[in-house]
């Protein structure tokens, strides 16, 4: 259970992106694809390691 709590913020972000995309698909189909694309860009930006030495 401790391992699951560690991933809770990531799970909530993904569920939020999914719910916004579904709502956009209900309004206009192309808007749904646009929201999914922006959500994936945002998720990638969040997951990319920041700083540090390469």
Image: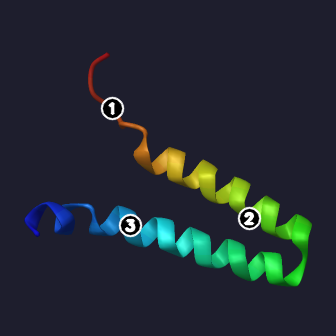
Give me the residue at 86% from left, 83% from top. 27
How far, Cα to Cα, is label 2 from label 3?
Answer: 18 Å
Whole-percent x and y of residue 52? 27, 27
Give me the residue at 27% from left, 19% from top. 53
Which corner quadrant holds the N terminus? bottom left
Give the camera-side residue of 25 and 40.
25
Give the image quarter of residue 20: bottom right
Q: Secondary structure at mark 3?
A: helix
Q: In this picture, is 1 found above or below 34?
A: below
- Badge 2 is on which residue? 35
How far, Cα to Cα, is label 3 from label 1?
Answer: 24 Å
Q: Which labelled disc corresponds to residue 11?
A: 3
- Please state which of the two labelled residues, at mark 2 or mark 3, is closer to the viewer: 3
> How would you rate the neighbour count of disc 3 (Cα within 10 Å): few for under 14, some for 14-19, many for 20 or more?
few
Which corner quadrant holds the C terminus? top left
- Badge 1 is on which residue? 51
Q: Choose the circle earlier in sequence order: 1 or 2.
A: 2
> How would you rate the neighbour count of disc 2 (Cα within 10 Å): few for under 14, some for 14-19, many for 20 or more?
some
Whole-percent x and y of residue 11? 38, 67
Give me the residue at 69% from left, 72% from top. 21
> How would you rate the neighbour count of disc 1 (Cα within 10 Å): few for under 14, some for 14-19, many for 20 or more?
few
Give me the residue at 74% from left, 64% from top. 35
Question: In the displayed image of the protein, which residue is found farthest to the left?
Answer: 2
Q: In this picture, is 3 found above or below 5?
A: above
Q: Are marks 3 and 1 in contact (CB under 8 Å)?
A: no
Q: Are marks 1 and 2 in contact (CB under 8 Å)?
A: no
Q: Choose the circle earlier in sequence order: 3 or 1.
A: 3
Whole-percent x and y of residue 31? 85, 68
How far, Cα to Cα, is label 1 from label 2?
Answer: 28 Å
């Amino acid at each position: 259970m401790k391992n699951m709590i560690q991933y809770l913020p990531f799970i909530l972000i993904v569920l939020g992106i999914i719910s916004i995309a579904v709502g956009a698909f209900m309004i206009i189909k192309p808007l749904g694809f646009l929201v999914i694309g922006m959500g994936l860009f945002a998720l990638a930006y969040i997951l990319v390691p920041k700083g540090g030495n390469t």
